[in-house]
Amino acid sequence: QKEVEQDPGPLSVPEGAIVSLNCTYSNSAFQYFMWYRQYSRKGPELLMYTYSSGNKEDGRFTAQVDKSSKYISLFIRDSQPSDSATYLCAMGGSGGSYIPTFGRGTSLIVHP
Amino acid sequence: DADVTQTPRNRITKTGKRIMLECSQTKGHDRMYWYRQDPGLGLRLIYYSFDVKDINKGEISDGYSVSRQAQAKFSLSLESAIPNQTALYFCATRPGLDTDTQYFGPGTRLTVL
């Protein structure tokens, strides 16, 4: 079993839909959690970062972490065609080494 | 100008050839990383460096070597390329302990025939 599991999709939704992207993990030492967005032929860019359980909101994006269930989610409200990309979750433990473990990524397609 | 640049952006080579991928950054970050990305496998760490004198192996370092020529430059070499090294390669940087954000370059698409 991989430390971080993420369904690769693709996930296809109509414009305006609420999108839910999820990752599960097995390492209880993970303390920080991130979501990256990767457009085709581009490098990943950080979308959301959180260091605790609960919700964090930024515009149309909400990151949710449930450490007791080892489950994280990214919600996208009012999805747009420009949100079409691959979304990667990443997480890691404490300390200065900072070697995050990435999920495989979920491909999201938002069609007009 | 991009903060993290990678050259070349695309490369096709033959089995057994030596290949060097280069990464440069203007962000002034000490920490640099090399990843490869394969369909269905996500990002896997090859090597990382916390400063010019510090080089560390990642999850999949076999068949690769690196050189940190300066704070701003981190090169990845494939001494004798093989077809299963065909992948998308990313360089990333990180400022230091006060933030966990990594900044990725645009990637190099490498094909080994």
Image: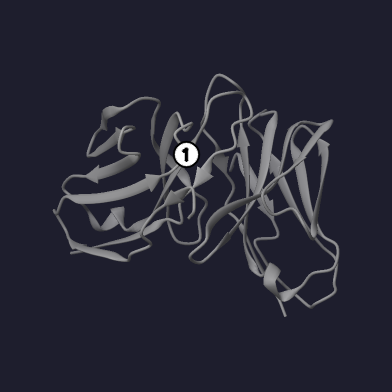
The residue at 23%/50% (across/down) is: A20
Q: Position of residue A18 (x, y in %)?
A: 16, 50
Say left or right for B10 vs B64.
Answer: left
Image height check: is A108 above or below B86?
Answer: above
Residue B92 quadrant: top right
B15 or A67, nearer to the observer: A67
Image height check: is A90 above or below A106?
Answer: above
> Which residue is farthest top?
B98
Say left or right for B41 vs A9.
Answer: right
The residue at 51%/67% (across/down) is: B39
- Please say which color scheme the image uses: one colour
A41 or A4, nearer to the observer: A4
Residue A54 quadrant: top left
Q: Position of residue A14 (x, y in %)?
A: 16, 62
Q: Position of residue A97 (x, y in %)?
A: 64, 29
B89 or B106, nearer to the observer: B89
The residue at 46%/44% (across/down) is: A45
A41 or A34, nearer to the observer: A34
Disc tally is 1
Residue B30 quadrant: top right
Q: Quadrant of the N terminus of chain B?
A: top right
Query: Mark 1 — residue?
Result: A27
Q: Quadrant of the C terminus of chain B?
A: bottom right
Q: Residues within 10 Å of mark 1 (few under 14, many from 20)?
A: some
Say left or right for B75 vs B90.
Answer: right
Three-letter amino acid code of the residue under disc 1: Asn
Image height check: is A19 above or below A32?
Answer: below
Helix, strand or loop at label 1? It is loop
Q: Position of residue B47 (x, y in %)?
A: 72, 46
Instruction: For mark 1, name the chain.
Output: A
